[in-house]
Structures are given as structure tokens and as C-alpha cells.
Image (cartoon, rainbow, N blue to C red):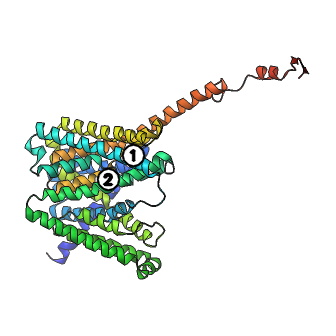
């Protein structure tokens, strides 16, 4: 390949990326108009872009727009964005000192984790008994069960944080508990994801390769952690914050790509680097983490488009609507009921408990990352990923409307309470004549008053 061909290919890929980013902006605008989190519109438009081109113009048109080498570059852009974004996501899993009571958090986290894991077992049982080999796939049963359970139990911390900020619930009891519990749930989820991918290797050599990759990632993460604790690193972050962000992003990409080359998904490498960054938000490197995460977030729409083309295009033809319905029902039941039950066992009132159930039902981008890891590892099939993608979109889109319903219910109860206490409806003016009569002198045994 000469320099001119390489330049044309890169230009084509950058142009495709620009179109993808414009589509993402349109999706965010549509989501705002529908009073949904912006990421919902971004994910939906990205996932459906490729299948829509195929449905309207055919597969030949998509191949002309995104030929193989250009698609590979776009996929690389998406992977880079995913790795950089995961650094910030994993960093948020480090719980700070300002958090709700431990007992309540434990109950909420347990309620939001254990029932969804059980619904994952139910879904794997349903797939094994009723679906064909194309849906079940050929992964070992323990890896398959664990991966589906993780996919059903994840809560999207970034999307949840955005919803809480948009609704002004960041400092509310329900918001703080839901976010803290989601951080704990996702931390457990990443660990289970690691085990599922290791089990999916199947043979002893694959397990040894996975263990070697994890050991390599852990050593690199510890090295990064100790390096960031030095005075030299602090001074570097203060004096050259942009250079510090570039160094952190390059380190994350290096570790992630090395682990992927060793047989482990790059997602875990990025997560290990994010977890390695100390969790003090006032530390100098907090700005570098934020910059890296924002850069990844900007490139994330390419990941959605690539996922839509590689997964949904082939999965739509083999889509099982009963499977999609079962996945959505079980996904909603596990989080809504589990979150509510955990909050009630933690001593919270019913209104707060239902809000927590609605909030932890948010899955969003984190779910897509888990599904992509399961698909790349050969544990999840494309039709099952399609069903779980639909489940993730539905449960995330439900969060806002459910909270609106709970808000209106509380408003009605407040009005009825006001009517009982005052004897009149809220906003109703008191009877002036009655008020004047109350002020007239009254004859009593002790005289006139």
C-alpha cells in the first residue's frame, strides 16, 4: 500500500467518523425533545444506522459507504473511544468517603444484584430449553450462565449519573443510594465478567492465557497506581494537565491492547487502569481522568455504529420475539422488584424504595460494553445479544417516565394531605365572610372578646 492509498483510506474513515458524530448529535437532540437521557438517542441512532442503510438501500450500499479497510479503521476508532471512556467509568467505581449508611447501601445493593442474577439464571434456562443452537451458542455452560447473569444485573453508572443530574436528584436520598449501590454492583459485575471470560476459554491453555493476561494487567495497574502516588506525578499533572491526560490515555490503550493480544478483552485492561487511579476527586490527576473519559465519550458513537453493523444486521434475521419479550420482562422484574425490596429491607419508605428500583433499572452504555465483551469472547450469540440490547434500551428509557409517575403520585398525595389539614384545596382562597365573622366580638362568661 502506497502513501496515497493510505491517505485516502484514512480520509474516508475520518469522514465516516464525522458522519457518525453528526448522527449522534441528532440522536441526542431527539432524546432531549422526548425528555430522555441524551445517551438513549445516541445509542439508538448508532445501533440502527447500519441496519437502516441495509434496509433502505441494500448491503451493497453499506459496503460502498464502509468498505472493509475503512470499516476496520472505524472499528479501531470505536475501540479507542471505548477504552478511554472506560478509564473514567472504572474510576467512578471507587466509592468516596461521603456515602449513605453502610447497612442501607448493603441492602439496596443486594436487592439490586441478587434478584437480577436469578433472572439471569431463568433466562439461561429458558434459552437452553426452548431456543435452538443458534441462540444458545457453543460456549461452556458455566461461562454462558455467568455471562447472562452479569448482563441482567448491570446498572449503568454513567447514564444513572446523568439522569440524576438532569432531574436534580444528585443529593436526594434515593439518588445517592441508587448511585452508590450501582457503583458497588458494577464493581462485582466486572469481577464476574472476568471470571466468565476466563471460563469461556474452555481448555486449560485458554485459561492459562487468560490468567497470564489478567496478571499482566494487574501488574501494569499496580505500577500505574504507585507511579501516580509519587510527587513527580503530582507536579506533572499540575504543570502539564493535557500532557498528563495524554500519558494516562496512552497507558490505558497500551495495557488494553496488550491484554487483547494475549487473549483477554481490551475492556478489562481499560477497567484495570481506571481502577488503578487513586479515588481522590481533588487530586491533580482527577482532571486527567476526566479529560480521557470525555475524549472516549466523544468517540463512543463509532462503537455503537460498529456494534449495530456487526451484531444487529445479522441478528435481525434470526430475531426471536419471544426471547426479546422474556428478556425485557425478566430485566424489568429483577431490577424494579429487587431494588424496591432491598430498599424496604434497608428501612426506607415505599416512595423512596420505588424510586431506587426505577433508578437501578438503568442499564444503557455499560450493558452494551458487557454484551460486546461476551460476544467478542464467543460466549453470547448475536440473537441473544440483540434481545439483551433491546432490554437495555427499554429499561433505560423507562427510568424517566417511571420517575414522572412517582412524582405525580406524590403530588396527588400531598394535595390530599393539604385538603385534610386545611379543609380546602391547595391554592383555594379562604372564605372572606367566614373569616370576618370569626373576627366579630363574641360574648363569653368572662366578658366580651
Callouts 1 and 2 close, C-beta under 8 Å: no
For the question of whether residue 201 can be seen, the reply is yes
Residue closest to the eye, 61 or 134? 134
Relative placement, left or right, of 96 versus 123 is right
Relative placement, left or right, of 20 versus 417 is left
| Element carrying mark 2 | helix
Farthest bottom residue in view: 232
With respect to residue 51, does 84 lie above or below?
below
Q: Position of residue 355 (x, y in %)?
A: 44, 40
With respect to residue 440, does 169 lie above or below?
below
Point out the image quarter for the N terminus: bottom left
Q: Residues within 10 Å of mark 1 (few under 14, many from 20)?
A: many
Quadrant of residue 94 within the rendered picture: bottom left
With respect to residue 441, does 80 lie above or below?
below
Which residue bears the numbered disc 1?
108
With respect to residue 169, does 79 lie above or below?
below
Which residue bears the numbered disc 2?
365
Residue closest to the eye, 139 or 8? 139
Q: Which of the numbered marks, if any, corresponds to residue 270?
A: none
| Element carrying mark 1 | helix
Point out the image quarter for the C terminus: top right
User: Closer to the N terminus: mark 1 or mark 2?
Assistant: 1
Quadrant of residue 395 within the rendered picture: top left
Q: Position of residue 296 (x, y in %)?
A: 34, 63
Amino acid at each position: 500500500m502506497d502513501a496515497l492509498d493510505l491517505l485516502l483510506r484514512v480520509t474516508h474513515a475520518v469522514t465516516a467518523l464525522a458522519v457518525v458524530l453528526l448522527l449522534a448529535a441528532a440522536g441526542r437532540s431527539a432524546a432531549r425533545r422526548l425528555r430522555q437521557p441524551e445517551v438513549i438517542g445516541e445509542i439508538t441512532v448508532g445501533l440502527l444506522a447500519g441496519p437502516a442503510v441495509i434496509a433502505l438501500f441494500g448491503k451493497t450500499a453499506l459496503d460502498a459507504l464502509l468498505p472493509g479497510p475503512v470499516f476496520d479503521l472505524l472499528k479501531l476508532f470505536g475501540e479507542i473511544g471505548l477504552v478511554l471512556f472506560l478509564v473514567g467509568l472504572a474510576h467512578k467505581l471507587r466509592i468516596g468517603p461521603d456515602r449513605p449508611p453502610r447497612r442501607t447501601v448493603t441492602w439496596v445493593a443486594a436487592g439490586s444484584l441478587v434478584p437480577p442474577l436469578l433472572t439471569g439464571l431463568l433466562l439461561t434456562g429458558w434459552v437452553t430449553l426452548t431456543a435452538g443452537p443458534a441462540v444458545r451458542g457453543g460456549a461452556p455452560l458455566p461461562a454462558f450462565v455467568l455471562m447472562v447473569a452479569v448482563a441482567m444485573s448491570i446498572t449503568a453508572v454513567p447514564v444513572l449519573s446523568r439522569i440524576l443530574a438532569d432531574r436534580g436528584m444528585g443529593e436526594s436520598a434515593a439518588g445517592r443510594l441508587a448511585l452508590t449501590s450501582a457503583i458497588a454492583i458494577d464493581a462485582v459485575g466486572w469481577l464476574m465478567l472476568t471470571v466468565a471470560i476466563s471460563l469461556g476459554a474452555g481448555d486449560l491453555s485458554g485459561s492459562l492465557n487468560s490468567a497470564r493476561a489478567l496478571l499482566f494487567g494487574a501488574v501494569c495497574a499496580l505500577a500505574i497506581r504507585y507511579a501516580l502516588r509519587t510527587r513527580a506525578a503530582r507536579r506533572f499533572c499540575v504543570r502539564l494537565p493535557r500532557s498528563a491526560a495524554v500519558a494516562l490515555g496512552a497507558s490505558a490503550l497500551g495495557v488494553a491492547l496488550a491484554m487483547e493480544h494475549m487473549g483477554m478483552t481490551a475492556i478489562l485492561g481499560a477497567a484495570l487502569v481506571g481502577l488503578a487511579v487513586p479515588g481522590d476527586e481533588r487530586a491533580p490527576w482527577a482532571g486527567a481522568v476526566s479529560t480521557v473519559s470525555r475524549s472516549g465519550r466523544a468517540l463512543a458513537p463509532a462503537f455503537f455504529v460498529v456494534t449495530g453493523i456487526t451484531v444487529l444486521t445479522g441478528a435481525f434475521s434470526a430475531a426471536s420475539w419471544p426471547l426479546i419479550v422474556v428478556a425485557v420482562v425478566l430485566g424489568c422484574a429483577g431490577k424494579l422488584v429487587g431494588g424496591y425490596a432491598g430498599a424496604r429491607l434497608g428501612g426506607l419508605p415505599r416512595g423512596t424504595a420505588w424510586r431506587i428500583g426505577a433508578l437501578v433499572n438503568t442499564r444503557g452504555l455499560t450493558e452494551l460494553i458487557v454484551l460486546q465483551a461476551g460476544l467478542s469472547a464467543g460466549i453470547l450469540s448475536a440473537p441473544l445479544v440483540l434481545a439483551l440490547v433491546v432490554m437495555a434500551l427499554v429499561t433505560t428509557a423507562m427510568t424517566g417516565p417511571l420517575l414522572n409517575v412517582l412524582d405525580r403520585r406524590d403530588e396527588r398525595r400531598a394535595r390530599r394531605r393539604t385538603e385534610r389539614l386545611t379543609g380546602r384545596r391547595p391554592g383555594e382562597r379562604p372564605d372572606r365572610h367566614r373569616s370576618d365573622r370569626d373576627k366579630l366580638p363574641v360574648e363569653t362568661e368572662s366578658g366580651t372578646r
